[in-house]
Image (cartoon, helix red, strand yellow):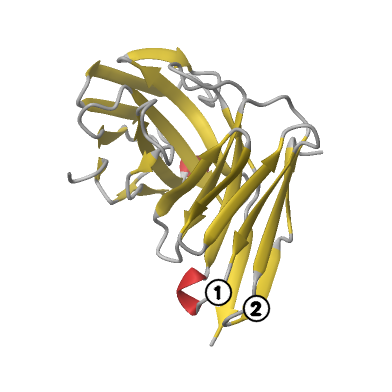
Amino acid sequence: KNEVEQSPQNLTAQEGEFITINCSYSVGISALHWLQQHPGGGIVSLFMLSSGKKKHGRLIATINIQEKHSSLHITASHPRDSAVYICAAFLNYGGSQGNLIFGKGTKLSVKP
Amino acid sequence: DAGVIQSPRHEVTEMGQEVTLRCKPISGHNSLFWYRQTMMRGLELLIYFNNNVPIDDSGMPEDRFSAKMPNASFSTLKIQPSEPRDSAVYFCASSSPRQPYGYTFGSGTRLTVV
């Protein structure tokens, strides 16, 4: 069993839909990272969070440390949101950036 | 800010040859990471440096892989000798504890070993 599990593996949505991608982890972590990888291959860091919720534009990330679960939400989805979304768990955090365990990614396709 | 700069963007080499991948982190970032991405295994951390010192190289697959960071503005990942199973995209990323969104990734180097 992977230590970081994402669901769904693939997701197709219509433009405008509200999208949720889930990430569950079995290890003790101090923070969780959401990444976006575009079809061209480039990787962009979206959020790094250790508690509560963060919002950036149409993207919202939440984490529940007790339940070992995080979600990434996209409101009013758009075809340009089509990408692979990857969650990654930090085993420790702070001045010395520790080891990172990656999920397998969720491939999102938003149709116009 | 030019971001994290990796070179080359693409590399095709023959099995057995030495390959050197290069990375220039963002100025002022004190942590640097090398990742490998393959279809089978996804993203994997190979090694990371903090203040130019290697902190954890447990992800380096074997002795054929080595990484150095001689100064705060430059790092290399070397594979010698290369094998076809090393074919992957290698990403470099840098970060600072003050960075709100985590890491900044380079564009990656796509390595093909034939």
Q: From the viewer's side, name the closer residue of A109 and B107.
A: A109
Quarter of image, res A109: bottom right
Under mark 2, the amino acid is Ala
Residue A51 position, x and y percent, is 63, 35
Residue at image position (31%, 19%) is B68
Measured in 3D between alpha carbons, the distance from the residue under mark 1 to the one under mark 2, in whole angstroms, is 8 Å
Q: Is residue B75 visible?
A: yes
Residue at image position (48%, 40%) is B36
Kindly identify which residue carries mark 2: A13
Residue B86 position, x and y percent, is 48, 40
Q: Is residue B114 visible?
A: no
Residue at image position (36%, 28%) is B98
Work out which residue is located at the far bottom of the displayed protein and give it: A112
Q: Are marks 1 and 2 in contact (CB under 8 Å)?
A: yes
| Vertical order, B48 against B41 (above or below) | above
Mark 1 belongs to chain? A
Local SS, label 1: loop
| Vertical order, B85 against A94 (above or below) | below
Q: Earlier in the sequence, mark 1 or mark 2?
A: 2
Residue B32 position, x and y percent, is 36, 27
Q: For the residues carrying marks 1 and 2, which lies nearer the camera in this image?
A: 1
Under mark 1, the amino acid is Ser
Local SS, label 2: strand
Q: Quadrant of the N terminus of chain B?
A: top left
Residue B48 horizontal side relative to residue B24, left or right: right
Kindly identify which residue carries mark 1: A77
Residue B4 horizontal side relative to residue A2, left or right: left
Q: From the viewer's side, name the closer residue of A83 and A22.
A: A22
